[in-house]
């Protein structure tokens, strides 16, 4: 046996020596560079590309069979430029020689240094590598015969690779379809020994840059790869992936992220798992565990996930626009479980809880047909724990003094359902409670993916607006009536889409007022508004400030700015030009600015900047009102028009309500047709043009007593003390009528007539609405006793026409009686009459003397003839 062993040993030694000698001879006599042209020719033949080898080729034979090559380039496809598609500065690969005799492949570390790839796609969608891919055999070709070679696992099992090292690699991608450019640079890829019975260490790192959008960064990965080819189990251990990037598309302009965990795929048992997966970025950390089964037949998965805010400052900086301050993000968390089945197309999230910005949310979800046509249903609950944090994103937009903490404890609960297949959605059992108000309702949506329309109903319980405002720290304006804004209730049905909305009030209640009816809007860009509303009774004066509830005596002066100029009317001209309006408003009873009215019925029409309020009618103070009001903003200057009529109105109460004093009493009838233009009050007054008529019956003009003015004037002329003023201070009349012609803000009257058993009055003059002055002359004649006018009779003034002048500001006119001139005119008339009477008496006396002389002459002649 020893001889046999010695023979075998010497034989092996001899064989080894022979191999060394053969390798030495081959290395000495064989130069691979001599075959450079044949290699490039073969590459051209099989790829159609030019292969350039700029460096030397070198071979090693023992104990390694290896090859080294430098500066190798593979040309680009036609139409993709002169740059080579691939370039390698240096490559090295070695295989142990002796294990090859045992059909085993033991490869040393494969090294690639300076690998540069230029990958591209042109505008037609063709890539610069697709010509290198063999064409698929025709469909009718018979399948190839089963190979007798070892199966892939057997082949790989016989392969041992010490590792792969890629250094200084660069990959560039240019997409002619999308215009995208991607660069991967400074790429290093390194593995440990590739074994199938032990974990394989793997490391890689690279920098990247995108052109559209502009983004650049770095990536580093460290992990261990497990390959159990026989049982088809694949693992990743100790995954540690970090990435940094910066670019305008990223929140806060930059991100640092880290992913850790483990992964398993068992293809035999059809199972995949993610264990301890953690993703950290922007100051938040997501943790999840997922198990999936039936990966091929139809995956089913279940797992858990949690999300926690670790660095509120960093996360707040990443929120667009600074919408959430760090305090609102502190303690933010998300936690839940899920299960899903792609085979059954189901999804379940039994209890998802989230906490953010002082708000806690709880959600349950059940889904069906989640791939074909998802249908989801479940419940949602929101509870505000800290109102200040909940409203932090909109804190700047809140009114001054708003107490966000008042929303603490607010709660929202609802059940929901969404069916994308049927394009429907529902919200049922909605309950919202906050700051003492409870709201219930629901909603239904249709065509939610194409033309969504939602309809439903909302209803509140009765609440106190003042209390709600006080709780929120909002001060409501002080009202004339302290009991105003103490009761409110909302009941409304609604329907709304992307470009339309409609409301039905059933009803809306505020204090003792009930508002019912419908309102709708279509085409939000150029609104078409329709409404039909009814109000039972409302007292608007209750809601005015206390000082405005009781108007001072006389008309209130118009508001003016610091320069003394009345501000222009705030008229949204551009909005009105695009508005399409049609509606009707009915009010059973109204009080506004002390004016009482009932049975108000107003129909509004408007389109393309032309609006009309007609028919417009109301009952007030024993009579009726009808009007036709117009507004035209289609042109450069807004224009106003009115055509109004009052019939049978009691003027005294009406003027008392409007102006604080009943200047004129009696049953009144008035008509007015006026036009004006402009937005500034002065411009409107200057352009006011039109006409009006008026007639008052069985009334009085208050503020002055013509008879008293005449007595005072008469006393002054006689040097007597002024008589005591009688009561009332008014001038009674049976009829007072006239007309007005208004042009450019000046109203002129020339036909004033007032009649009574005591006086006859006529007048003429003007009121300048631009300068707010009056200049008027009244001619009064006494035709009866003045005892009924609060004083003694002035019989000496009877039948005398006495001028009365009214001049000065409209708010404080001055009255003067021109009695002296009237008396002088009367004396002149009397003197002239006396002269006329004396002349008549003289003429009569002369005529009598003449007749007497004639008779005497005739007597004398007769006597003479007797002789």
Image (cartoon, helix red, strand yellow):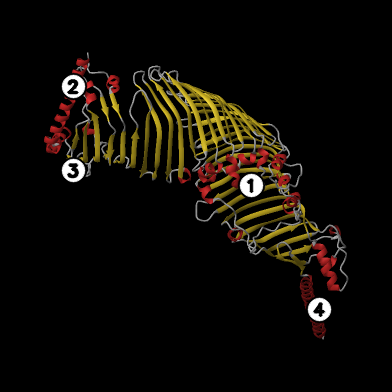
Residue sticking out furthest to the top: 1
Question: How far is disc 2 from disc 1 in space, using C-alphas?
Answer: 102 Å
Q: Which residue carries the number 2 mark? A: 10
Locate residue 644, reporting x and y percent. Answer: 63, 49
* Lateral position of residue 729 relative to residue 424, left or right: right
Label 1, label 4: how far apart the Cα atoms are:
103 Å
Q: Earlier in the sequence, mark 2 or mark 3?
A: 2
Query: In the image, which is nearer the foreground, mark 2 or mark 1?
Result: 2
On the rendered structure, is 763 left or right of 322? right
Find numbered disc 2 in the image and state the secondary structure of the residue it sits on: helix
Q: Secondary structure at mark 1?
A: loop
Q: Which mark is residue 845?
A: 4
Which residue position is annotated with label 3? 54
Q: Secondary structure at mark 3?
A: loop
- Residue 166 in percent (x, y) is at 31, 37
Give the foreground label among 4 and 2.
Answer: 2
């Amino acid at each position: 046996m020893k001889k046999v062993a010695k023979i075998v040993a010497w034989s092996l030694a001899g064989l080894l020596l022979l191999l060394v000698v053969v390798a030495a001879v081959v290395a000495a006599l064989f130069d691979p560079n001599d075959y450079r042209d044949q290699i490039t020719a073969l590459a051209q033949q099989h790829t159609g590309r030019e292969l350039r080898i700029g460096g030397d080729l070198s071979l090693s034979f023992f104990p390694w069979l290896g090859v080294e090559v430098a500066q190798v380039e593979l040309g680009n496809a036609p139409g993709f430029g002169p740059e080579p598609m691939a370039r390698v500065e240096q490559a090295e690969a070695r295989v142990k020689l002796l294990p090859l005799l045992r059909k085993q492949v033991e490869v040393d570390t494969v090294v690639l240094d300076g690998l540069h790839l230029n990958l591209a796609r042109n505008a037609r969608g063709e890539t610069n590598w697709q010509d290198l891919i063999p064409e698929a055999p025709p469909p009718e070709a018979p399948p190839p015969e089963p190979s007798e070679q070892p199966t892939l696992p057997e082949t790989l099992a016989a392969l041992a690779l010490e590792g792969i090292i890629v250094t200084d690699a660069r990959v560039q991608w240019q997409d002619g379809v999308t215009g995208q450019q991607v660069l991967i640079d400074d790429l290093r890829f390194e593995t440990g020994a590739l074994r199938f019975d032990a974990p394989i260490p793997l490391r890689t790192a690279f920098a990247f840059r995108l052109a559209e959008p502009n983004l650049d960064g770095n990536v580093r990965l460290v992990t261990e790869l497990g390959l159990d080819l026989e049982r088809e189990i694949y693992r990743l251990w100790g995954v540690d992936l970090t990435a940094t990037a910066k670019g305008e598309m990223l929140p806060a302009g930059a991100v640092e992220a880290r992913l850790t965990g483990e992964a398993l795929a068992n293809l035999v048992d059809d199972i995949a798992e993610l264990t301890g997966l953690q993703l950290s970025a922007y100051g938040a950390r997501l943790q999840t565990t997922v198990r999936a089964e039936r990966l091929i037949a139809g995956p089913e998965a279940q797992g858990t996930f949690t999300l926690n805010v670790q660095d509120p400052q960093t996360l707040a900086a990443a929120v667009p626009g600074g919408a959430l301050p760090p305090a609102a993000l502190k303690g933010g968390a998300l936690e839940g479980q899920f299960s899903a089945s792609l085979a059954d197309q189901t999804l379940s999230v039994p209890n998802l809880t989230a906490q953010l910005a002082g708000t806690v949310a709880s959600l349950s979800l059940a889904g069906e047909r989640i791939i074909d046509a998802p249908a989801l249903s479940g419940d949602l609950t929101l509870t505000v724990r800290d109102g200040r944090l909940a409203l932090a994103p909109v804190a700047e937009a809140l009114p001054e003094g708003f107490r966000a903490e008042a929303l603490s404890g607010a709660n929202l609960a609802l059940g929901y359902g969404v069916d994308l297949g049927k394009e429907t959605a529902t919200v049922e059992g909605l309950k919202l409670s906050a700051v003492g108000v409870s709201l219930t309702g629901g909603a239904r949506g249709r065509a939610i993916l194409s033309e969504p329309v939602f309809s439903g109903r909302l209803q509140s319980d009765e609440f106190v607006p003042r209390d709600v405002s006080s709780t929120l720290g909002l001060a409501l304006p002080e009202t004339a009536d302290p009991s105003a804004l103490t009761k409110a209730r909302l009941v409304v049905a609604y329907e709304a889409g992307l470009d339309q909305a409609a409301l039905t009030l059933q009803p809306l209640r505020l204090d003792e007022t009930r508002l019912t009816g419908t309102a709708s809007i279509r085409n939000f860009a150029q609104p078409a508004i329709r409404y039909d509303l009814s109000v039972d009774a409302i007292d608007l004066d209750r809601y005015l400030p206390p000082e405005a509830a009781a108007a001072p005596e006389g008309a209130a002066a118009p508001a003016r700015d610091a320069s003394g100029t009345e501000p222009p009317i705030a008229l949204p001209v551009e909005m009105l030009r695009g508005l399409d309006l049609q509606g009707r408003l009915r009010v059973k009873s109204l009080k506004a600015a002390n004016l009482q009215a009932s049975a108000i019925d107003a129909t509004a029409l408007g389109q393309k900047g032309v609006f009309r309020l007609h028919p417009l009618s109301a009952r007030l103070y024993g009579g009726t009102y009808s009007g036709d009001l117009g507004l035209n903003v289609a042109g450069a200057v807004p224009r106003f028009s009115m055509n109004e009529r009052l019939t049978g109105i009691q003027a005294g109460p009406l003027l008392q309500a409007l102006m604080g004093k009943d200047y004129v009493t009696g049953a009144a009838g008035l008509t007015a047709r006026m036009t004006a233009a402009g937005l500034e009050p002065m411009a409107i007054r200057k352009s006011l043009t039109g006409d009006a008529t008026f007639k008052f019956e069985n009334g009085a003009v208050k503020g002055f007593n013509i008879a008293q003015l005449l007595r005072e004037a008469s006393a002054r002329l006689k040097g007597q003390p002024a008589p005591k003023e009688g009561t009332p201070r008014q001038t009674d009349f049976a009829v007072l009528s006239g007309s007005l012609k208004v042009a450019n803000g000046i109203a002129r009257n020339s036909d004033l007539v007032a009649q009574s058993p005591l006086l006859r009055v006529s007048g003429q003059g003007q009121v300048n609405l631009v300068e707010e002055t009056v200049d008027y002359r009244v001619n009064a004649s006494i035709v009866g006793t003045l005892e009924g006018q609060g004083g003694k009779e002035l019989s000496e003034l009877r039948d005398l026409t006495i001028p009365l002048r009214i001049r000065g500001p409209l708010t404080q006119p001055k009255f003067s009686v021109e009695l002296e001139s009237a008396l002088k005119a009367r004396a002149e008339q009397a003197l002239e009459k006396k002269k006329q009477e004396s002349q008549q008496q003289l003429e009569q006396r002369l005529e009598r003397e003449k007749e007497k002389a004639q008779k005497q002459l005739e007597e004398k002649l007769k006597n003479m003839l007797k002789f």
